[in-house]
Structure formats: C-alpha cells, structure tokens
Image (cartoon, coloured by chain):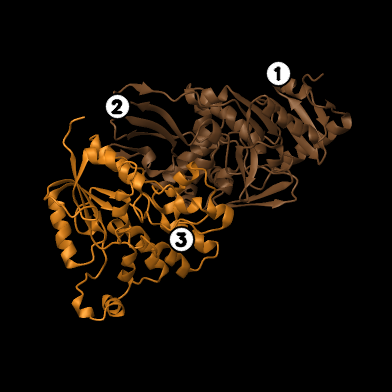
Amino acid sequence: MMRRKLKVAVFKFASCSGCQLQILNMEDELLTLTDAVEFTYFLEASRATAPGPYDVAFIEGSISTPEQEELVRRVREESRILVAMGACATAGGIQALRNWLRLDDVKRAVYPNPEWVKALEHSKPVAEVVKVDYELRGCPVSKERLLSFIKQVLVGRKPYLRREALCMDCRRKGNVCVMVAKGIPCLGPVVQEGCGAICPTFGRGCYGCFGPSIDARPEALASRLREVGMKDRDVARLFKGFTGWSEKFRKVINELEGGAR
Amino acid sequence: MVSGGIYSGKFGELRKLFNALRLRGYRVIAPKLEDGVIRLKEVTSFDEVPYGWEDIQAPGKYSVREGGKHFRHGPDAPKRILYPPRLELFRLRPDWSVEYPKERFPPTALFAIKPCDLASISVMDRVQGGIGDPYYLALRKKLIIIVENCVEPGATCFCSTMGTGPEARDGFDIAYTRLDDNLVVFRPGSDLGVELLSELNIEPATDEVLRKYYDALKNASLKAKAPFELERLPDELELGLNSPVFKEVAERCFGCAGCNMVCPTCFCFDVIDEPELDGGAVRVRVWDGCFSYTYAEVAGGNFRKDLWARYRHWVLHKFAYWVRQFGVFGCVGCGRCITWCPAGIDLRETIKSVVEWVRSRGGG
C-alpha cells in the first residue's frame, strides 16, 4: 500500500522514559510499524531528528519546569494530534506527590544547591498547559493500547479506546474480584481500563496508574473502604500513588486529609 | 429401565454420570475450586468438583470453607460459556474479503450448575436465541445440562421468589439432588437424560426417599426468599420511577458495572473494530453494561448521564421492561450482583424500598 508515512514524534518531559520504552518494546510489530510510521523525533530510539510538523506527537512526562511549559507549547503548535502518554503526562505522575508539599522544602531535601533548580509550583499534567487530543494512560502506558491507537490513526478513523472502569475488563477477563473474595482494597472500580487488569490478575488490588475512569466516583469507593475499616490516611495514600493529582482523585484525597490544598 | 420419574442412587452414581459425559466426548464444565473461589471451568476429573466445600456469601463478601455440605455458585454464570466476554466475530483480510472463525465450540456439558443458572439459560434462549444470535445458537445446540438442585441456598439467594429454584423444573437433561452424603435423587428431563440415567445403578425412589426429597426442597424454598413478591412488581416499580430510593442507593454505587458482568442474563455488548497493520481488521464483541457511562452515549449526548438513572434503568429493565420485552423477568435470583458488588449494595433492599415508597403514596 503506498501512502505517505505518518510522521510521529515522541517527546520526554518529567518522566522515567518507561512509556517511550513501551514503543520500543513492540518488538513483534516494530518492523511492520516502521513501514507505515516515520519516527521523526524520538531521542530514545535515534539521535537523528527531523523538524516538524508532526502528524502525531506523543508526550511523555509531566510539566514541571518553566522550560517544559515553553517546549510543550511549541510541540503543540507543530502537531496535528497531540497525545498525552502515561500517568505523568495525563495526571502529573508520582512526582506530583510533591504538589502536596512546599516546593522549597522538597528542593532542599533533594538538591545541595536548591537555588539552581527552577521548578514550577506543581508537577502538572500536559492538559493543564496545552490542549490534549487524546490520553493514553498508565504507568507505563499499555503497549497494546498504544499500538491500537496508532493503527486506528493509520486507517484514518477517530481512535476509539474504552474508558470505563477497570472492573469491567477485569471481570471480562475472568478474574475474581479481590475486594469481594479477598478483602483487598482495589481502585479498579474507579480507574480506567486499558492495562488488562494486571494487578488483580496477580491477586493484588489496582494501584490506579490509569487514573480515573470516565465517570468515576472515587468518593463512593473511599466511603466504602472506610466503612470496611480502612483509616482515612490509608485511603488517601491509596489514591495518591500514581494519579493522585488527577482532578477527581485529588478532591477525595484533600477531603480525606482535611482540606490541605 | 429408566423413563420419566424420580430415581435414587448412591453418590458414586454421580461419578459414573460424569465419566459417561466425558466418554461421550463432551467438554465438561463444572464448579471447580480455584484459589478460594468456586469457578465454572472445564474439569477433567469428577474429583475436581468441590463436593464437601461450601461458599459463604453476603453483600460484597465471598469465601469458602471445607466441610460444608453444599456449594452454590461463584462469580461465573453459564453466560461466560455461552455468550463469551470477548468474541471474535470475523476478520477482514487486507483484500477486504471476510473470514469467519472456524467451528470452535465443542459439544459441552454443564455439570452441577444450579437451578438459577439453568433458568438464566432459558432467559438467554429468549434473548440471544430469540434474535437468532448465531454465535449463541451454535454453542447452545451442543449443550447438555446436568443441574444440581439446591438443598441449602445461600444468604444472597432469592430463586424462590423469582420462581427459578431451588428445584429445577424444566430445560435440563438431568436434575439431581444430594439429600445426604450417600443418597442422590435423579430426574431425567430429556431423552438424552433418560439414556444417560439408564447406564446408572439407580432405582425408582421409594416413598421415604420422596418424602425426604420434597421436604428438603420445600425447606430450601423457604430460605431463598427476597423481601418482595413478584405479583404486580413490574407495575409497582414503574410507579416508583420517581422514588428517591434510586438516587440514595446510587450514592453508594461506584458505577463499575461489576454487577452487569456477573449477572447471568445481562446481555449488553460493544462491538469494536480493531484495524491491523496489514490493512485488515478484526471485529470483536465484548461485554458492555448499562452501568457504564458510554453505553447510552450517542452523538451529541447521553440518555442516562447520571449514575442514578443508570442504576434505576438496570433495576427496571430486569424487573419490569424485560417482562414486557421477553415475557420473563430478567432476574433469576442468583444473587451474584449482591455478593460480587464491591460496594455491597443489596438489590433486594432496593426493590423492597421502592415498593414501600410506592405503597406509602397509595400507588400499586
């Protein structure tokens, strides 16, 4: 099939690079994929880069510094479709835990010369700075979803990815509910599907790395967890882990922690 | 010679029956204990069926213990087998020709399923069967059903109210009842059932056995009751459309659709086209549910944007609209939506409260 290759860029912001690695992890599909896709900017894979504009830009990482704010705005201008990829880009990531603390205290605890570090007050999801067209969630992002997204863009349709609660996918898969059968706290009922229910498959509760599902009611889950005996602090910590700074989880956390921020 | 009627035999005859199914080439799907939960899975040995175990069920809680006399059911309903959670419907090749999956359903025996689950199959026969879903019908026509009547219903069971148990009435090949450790009552429900029972060492039940049998089932039926009656329920629930109960209960609901997934009759699905890199595509059908936000979402809006409206719709569909659509209730009283609700919401209480609200206002 002769068609113009899709120009794809991958940009890293405040992140661990795990999401970009998921692209390189598509070992079985990568060769076929590169027949249809040209990675014009993807430093994790190649130092050769080409200028924009890009058909699709994947943004990994949260926006944590003034420079990053500037850069992501430029990427936005150069990109037809901008995709926030992973928990950092979509919800601020684990590093957003600092958003509940004073920035100066955090800087001092980490760096010998904190005055050299220019950081934003908050570690922010990309959508707080520029318009995001699609979100691919997870820590790391799911390889299958990423590939499905690219395939759908390639055929020229509006990408469709289910955004319902993980419970649906978990139960479709045939997992037994860990909350009901084992009394393990699980964020699955309020977290977006897409990971294939990895943690519950191995008998663990969902840690919430995909962030809130489309119509999530974390406040109802929080009251149930308290009702069955969890302490407010522990419930807050559960929600805080990966995507605590997402609007919906943040609200619940703040209520549990007594209105801080 | 076995014909219609009621027979009794020793526990060992059940093993013989199980083995006879395997010898005839059936894939046998039966209750099986796995990681502390009774699943519905393929079993190759009679010893895998968890006789001697019992499950303990309550709203939002499930556990098992050894030493119990009777197991009920776990999270898996026959729906999982007959109407798989994810089913490839067809493949589109790069040249746009269509390839349908090859014959993929082996003849299957459901062994030791419960009367409520048997009833769910008859509901599916009206719904999926009624519209002629070829994937369902392909599996269904190769199905043989051995049902175990419930002598000890669980705490979330209400088959007695729904009229689906604890004794299976029809639609099975063989129904059996374990009256005690070594006394099993058998009833054939089809020609194939008669044929299979003819191979067993059983005899027509004596009056004493019959008395024991009827007592046990009567006793069980007293236990599996919900705090409402079916008579006039569809009308009463529709009068309760504006009851505040739905909103109150939905406050506790996560909207996770777990109930849709474990419900043996919930049939909602999503169809997804997955393009391939070679230019082809796969069309799959996956379970969806009316609790999910996107289910009633259309271009420009959502028919049931609020969770309470989705909750209300589910309850009313099961207990009112379904009756008008398909001539039966959409609920078989298995109680899975109660046990497997991570929020511990009890459907029976919702219905009871709505009916009370309607009556308090002079309706119904």
Determine the chain carrying the residue at label 1: B
Give x and y (percent) for residue A40. Answer: 17, 48
Closer to the camera in the image, B290 or A4: A4
Q: Residue at x 67, y 46 (%)?
A: B154
Q: Are marks 2 and 1 on the same chain?
A: yes
Mark 2 residue type: Pro
The brown-coloured chain is labelled B
- Chain A's shade in the image? orange
Closer to the camera in the image, B109 or A36: A36
Determine the chain carrying the residue at label 3: A
A43 relative to B206, above or below:
below
Q: Quadrant of residue A115?
A: bottom left
- The reply to whether residue B306 is in sight is yes
Give x and y (percent) for residue A177. Answer: 53, 50
The residue that mark 3 highlights is A222
B49 relative to B244, above or below:
above
Left or right for A216, reference B147 = left
Label 1 neighbour load within 10 Å: few <14, some 14-19, many 20+: few
Q: Are marks 3 and 2 in contact (CB under 8 Å)?
A: no
Q: Secondary structure at mark 2?
A: loop
The residue that mark 1 highlights is B191
Which disc, if any, is residue B322?
Answer: none
The residue that mark 2 highlights is B94
Left or right for B116, reference A198 = right
Q: Quadrant of residue B297?
A: top left
Q: Residue at x 26, y 68 (%)?
A: A122
Q: How many marks?
A: 3
Mark 3 residue type: Ala
Closer to the camera in the image, A240 or A199: A199
Determine the chain carrying the residue at label 2: B
